[in-house]
Image (tube, helix red, strand yellow):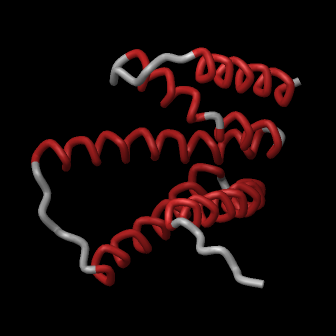
Amino acid sequence: MEVPEVNAAVAFGLLTMVSWGIWIVVGNAASESIDPATAAAISYLVAAILAVGYVFVSGASLAITPRGGALAGVAGMFAGIGFVSMYIGLSRGSTTVVSTLGAMYFVVAAFIGMAVLGDEITVTRVAGLLLAGVGIILVAR
């Protein structure tokens, strides 16, 4: 029996899913052991070291355009806000609720994509987003 070849996007998507799932659980434990903002800062520092190390090891281009640098900076700002709020949320509530709500970031991205970036609005996409909203309501109860 042959093992099917896995698409790189699927492989990295699965690695992301598993890594972030473990991150939430360990982050919850960290936020119960030390101040959640401090736990977030330590976690982000380690993540930054890994990301910078990967840039150098992988031979990624170090060329930064003003637009690309600014956009990456703004993305980092929002990632940091989300990161810290996740740790604080974990220290004050259920891992199930906080992690599920945080994982619904795709709903925000989808709305921005359709409203601002010109992504096609279809019945299927709207239905999917509405179902995600129902999921948020069910998990938060």
As displayed, is residue 34 above or below residue 125?
below
Image location of residue 3, percent across then percent down: 70, 80
Image location of residue 110, percent across then percent down: 50, 27
Viewer-nearest residue: 115 or 4: 4
Query: Which image quadrant: the C terminus?
Result: top right
Viewer-nearest residue: 26 or 14: 14
Image location of residue 80, percent across then percent down: 46, 46
Viewer-nearest residue: 116 or 119: 119
Image location of residue 103, percent across then percent down: 65, 41
Viewer-nearest residue: 62 or 122: 122
Q: Is residue 51 left or right of residue 97?
A: left
Q: Is residue 53 left or right of residue 84?
A: left
x 11%, y 51%: residue: 65
Query: Which image quadrant: the N terminus?
Result: bottom right
As displayed, is residue 60 above or below residue 114?
below
Instruction: Give the mark count.
Output: 0
Residue extending farthest to the right is: 141
x 49%, y 21%: residue: 111
Q: Is residue 35 left or right of residue 94?
A: left
The image quadrant that residue 58 belongs to is bottom left
The image quadrant that residue 62 belongs to is bottom left
x 44%, y 74%: residue: 50
The image quadrant that residue 74 belongs to is top left
